[in-house]
């Protein structure tokens, strides 16, 4: 029997990326319907936000649901912007606004220091009547003062991937998806589910 998995997103790119991982389990992946409830992301951790989204969608549709939450953690800023990555410069902030604020807060560190940072992703799978599974993935790097590349979004032009010499925005979508924090978290989730299937076989 094929399992239908609802994703707490309407982003077609994200749906395709996640569907590729779950295809090997024989799971059918679909975005949430247009009438899905809006879930307020008010938890103080990536895992908390991902679990809340997945659990509310799973309960509403009475079936498996998967959600992710991700963002940037900068060591010199004690882990900020963290869960506020998308709204670092305010509720309606653009990518440019957020990057400007990031560079302003780090302005005293250059050129002598290279601020270390990581992208973090938490993936949560909720199933009615079962414990919610959560997996994590990280991508280490440093923040660059100058923006480089045009393939990315968000903080990608200022995030140089560790040992690569390139920012995420200088990488192809395919390359980024292979090494990304979300890809690592998805791989971990699929491994957990495969182990679960093996135990039930």
Image (cartoon, rainbow, N blue to C red):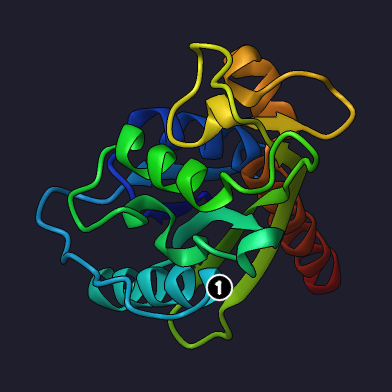
Residue 30 locus on image (x, y percent): 36, 43
Is 159 positioned to the left or the right of 60 in the image?
right
Q: Does the image show residue 34?
A: yes
Q: Which residue is drawn at the image coordinates 31% and 76% (left, top)? A: 56
Looking at the rendered structure, the number of numbered marks drawn on it comes to: 1
> 2 or 46: nearer the eye?
46
Residue 129 locus on image (x, y percent): 48, 88
Q: Which residue is drawn at the image coordinates 23% and 74% (left, top)? A: 60
Task: Identify the image quadrant of residue 161.
Answer: top right
Q: Does the image show residue 8?
A: no
Q: Which residue is drawn at the image coordinates 90% and 29% (left, top)? A: 163
Q: Where 199 sits versus 23, above or below?
A: below
Is 104 positioned to the left or the right of 88 in the image?
right
Q: Where 136 sits versus 94, above or below?
A: below
Residue 164 locus on image (x, y percent): 84, 22
Is 196 positioned to the left or the right of 82 in the image?
right
Quadrant assignment for the C terminus: bottom right
> 174 or 156: nearer the eye?
156
Q: Where 175 sits versus 179, above or below?
A: above
> 111 or 54: nearer the eye?
111
> 87 or 172: nearer the eye?
87
Is 183 positioned to the left or the right of 123 in the image?
right
Residue 110 locus on image (x, y percent): 69, 38
Question: Residue reaching furthest left?
Answer: 35
Tell me the element at label 1. helix
Question: Residue reaching furthest right?
Answer: 163
Q: Which residue is drawn at the image coordinates 33% and 48% (left, top)? A: 9
**Residue on which disc 1 sits:** 47
């Amino acid at each position: 029997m094929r399992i239908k998995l609802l994703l707490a997103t309407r982003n077609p790119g994200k749906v395709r990326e996640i569907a590729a991982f779950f295809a090997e389990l024989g799971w059918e992946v679909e975005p949430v319907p247009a009438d899905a409830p809006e879930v307020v992301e008010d938890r103080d951790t990536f895992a908390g936000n991902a679990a809340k989204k997945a659990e509310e969608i799973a309960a509403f549709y009475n079936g498996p649901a998967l959600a992710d939450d991700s963002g940037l953690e900068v060591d010199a800023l004690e882990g900020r912007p963290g869960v506020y990555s998308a709204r670092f410069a305010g509720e309606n902030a653009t990518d440019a606004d957020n990057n400007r604020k990031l560079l302003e807060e780090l302005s005293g560190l250059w050129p002598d220091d290279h601020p270390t940072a990581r992208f973090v992703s938490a993936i949560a799978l909720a199933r009615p009547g079962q414990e919610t599974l959560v997996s994590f993935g990280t991508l280490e790097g440093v923040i660059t003062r100058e923006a480089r590349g045009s393939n990315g979004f968000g903080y990608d032009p200022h995030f140089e991937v560790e040992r690569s010499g390139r920012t995420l925005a200088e990488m192809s979508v395919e390359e980024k998806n292979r090494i990304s924090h979300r890809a690592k978290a998805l791989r971990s989730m699929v491994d957990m589910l495969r182990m679960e299937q093996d135990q039930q076989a």
